[in-house]
Image (cartoon, rainbow, N blue to C red):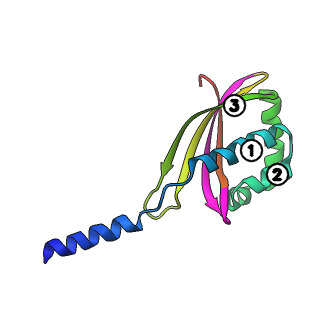
Amino acid sequence: MKNLIYLFLSILIVSCAAKPMDVNEAKRVVEELIVKIDQEDFAAVEQLYSTEFNASEPMETKKEKLLQLKRALGKLKNMEFISSENVAEFGQPAKVILEYKVFHSKITSIETFSVVENEGGYKIGSHLVKSEGN
């Protein structure tokens, strides 16, 4: 009887596990964001960020930061996918972490994105930029 209870609990836990996010869809959203930032299409950029990320500060502030970043890095030349990791922590929404090497006219950066499912689609939950080698 005890074994039956453990078996039932195991099946219940496994069936409740969140399915991993679609890495290809997450990559599409990230790559679109990189291009839209380079094109300075901030209306499209805002639509690609999650509700929580947009609420963290006004879009006008984000726009100024992104313009400063673009001036420092230079124009987008190319991007290269490095890695992905599906993350499912108990009590937290599932997310996929994507890392890209992004080639700009002045500097090559390593950019890390957290992609979450938000409002029926995949959205950027966070974005970290480091210069290559740092």
- Amino acid type of disc 1? Glu
For residue 34: magenta? no
Q: How many marks?
A: 3
Q: What residue range appears in magenta?
A: 107-122
Q: Quadrant of the C terminus?
A: top right
Give the mark nearer the N terminus: 2 vs 3: 2
Circle 3 residues within 10 Å: few <14, some 14–19, many ≥20: some
Question: Callout 2 environment at 10 Å: few (<14), some (14 to 19), or many (20+)?
Answer: few
Q: Is residue 97 above or below residue 50?
A: above
Q: Secondary structure at mark 2?
A: helix
Is 4 placed left or right of 94 in the picture?
Answer: left
Choose top left, top right, bottom left or bottom right for residue 117: bottom right
Q: Quadrant of residue 55?
A: bottom right
How far apart are labels 1 and 3 at the CA level?
11 Å
Q: Earlier in the sequence, mark 1 or mark 3?
A: 1
Q: Quadrant of the N terminus?
A: bottom left
Q: Position of residue 38 (x, y in %)?
A: 82, 37
Image marks 2 and 1: residues in contact by CB distance under 8 Å: yes
Amino acid carrying label 3: it is: Met
Determine the residue positioned at 67% across, 28% down: 109
Residue 79 got which mark? 3
Camera-nearest residue between 38 and 57: 38
Instruction: Identify the residue at horizontal 82%, vertical 28% (top origin).
Output: 75
Label 2 amino acid?
A: Ala
Q: Which mark is residue 32?
A: 1
Label 2: which residue?
Answer: 44
